[in-house]
Image (spheres, rainbow, N blue to C red):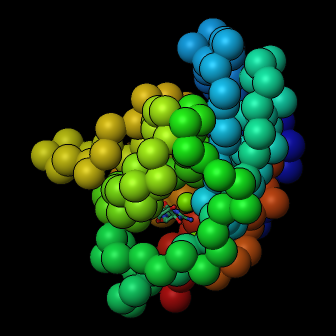
Amino acid sequence: MEAMHPDVDRVLFSKEDIADMVKRMGAQISKDYEGKDLVLIAVLRGAVVFMGDLMRAIDCPLAIDFMAVSSYGDGAKSSGIVRIVKDLDIDIKGRDVLIVEDILDSGLTLKYLMKNLSSRHPASLEVATFLWKDVEGRTTAIDPKYVGTHCPDEFVVGYGLDFAERYRNLPYVGVLKPEVYA
Ligand code: 5GP
Ligand code: MG
Ligand code: MG
């Protein structure tokens, strides 16, 4: 296994774990979207790494596009009210849209986004999330069709996920050492 970053307390999902999960998701998506008009939409910036891997694990024709949103509120907790900072460049009307997400926590951000995208009348609209923090006793606002893996209720970084814009380039998903937050 690759050397661990000194700020990382422990690795939750290794590069090899991730490759397996992405391969499995890509195979399922390829099957489900055969003969359809697939458009992958990633929300910047966290989902970029997963998007890059997932699109190469799908072997049916597809288009990709990106959106950027900024949340209102203190940033620590999802308010679910977002402003679209960068909108899609392509028209999704009548197409089969799959939102590609890095991590699903409350799901509030995605719920808002899905409502917005639905109003553009895609033929279908689903979510593929790499990580899902589906904590017991709490419900997620949306139901993802494809999930890489479940994730414990801890703050994770790597594989696109940041803390203060750092650690996105780590090839694994890990938990930061508590002193990094202090
Ligand atoms: P939600 O609206 O689902 O609560 O918020 C999801 C967003 O919060 C993710 O797209 C991500 O940007 C951020 N987020 C939630 N949990 C984590 C985490 O454990 N680590 C990192 N780096 N970001 C997280
Ligand atoms: Mg995200
Ligand atoms: Mg972030």
Q: Nearer the viewer, residue 56 or 96?
A: 96
Please give the name of the residue rendered at 85% of the width and 49% of the height, measured from the top-left corner.
Answer: 3
Residue 174 in view: no
Residue 17 point in image, percent of width and height: 68, 28
Residue 138 point in image, percent of width and height: 18, 50
- The quarter holding residue 57 reads top right
Residue 31 in view: yes
Q: Is residue 58 left or right of residue 101?
A: right
Location of residue 72 with respect to 101 vertically, above or below? below
Location of residue 33 with respect to 13 vertically, above or below? above
Location of residue 76 with respect to 120 vertically, above or below? below
Q: Is residue 4 left or right of residue 110?
A: right
Q: Is residue 84 left or right of residue 31?
A: left
Q: Nearer the viewer, residue 182 or 140?
A: 140
Residue 72 point in image, percent of width and height: 40, 86
Please give the name of the residue rendered at 56% of the width and 44% of the height, measured from the top-left corner.
Answer: 93
Q: Which residue of the protein is positioned furthest toward the left in this rendering?
A: 137
Q: Nearer the viewer, residue 111 or 1?
A: 111
Q: Nearer the viewer, residue 16 or 132?
A: 132
Location of residue 108 with respect to 51 vertically, above or below? below
Please give the name of the residue rendered at 41% of the width and 50% of the height, measured from the top-left corner.
Answer: 118
Residue 123 point in image, percent of width and height: 49, 33
Please give the name of the residue rendered at 61% of the width and 60% of the height, measured from the top-left corner.
Answer: 43
Q: Quadrant of the N terminus?
A: top right
- The quarter holding residue 80 reads bottom left
**Count of marks placed on residues:** 0
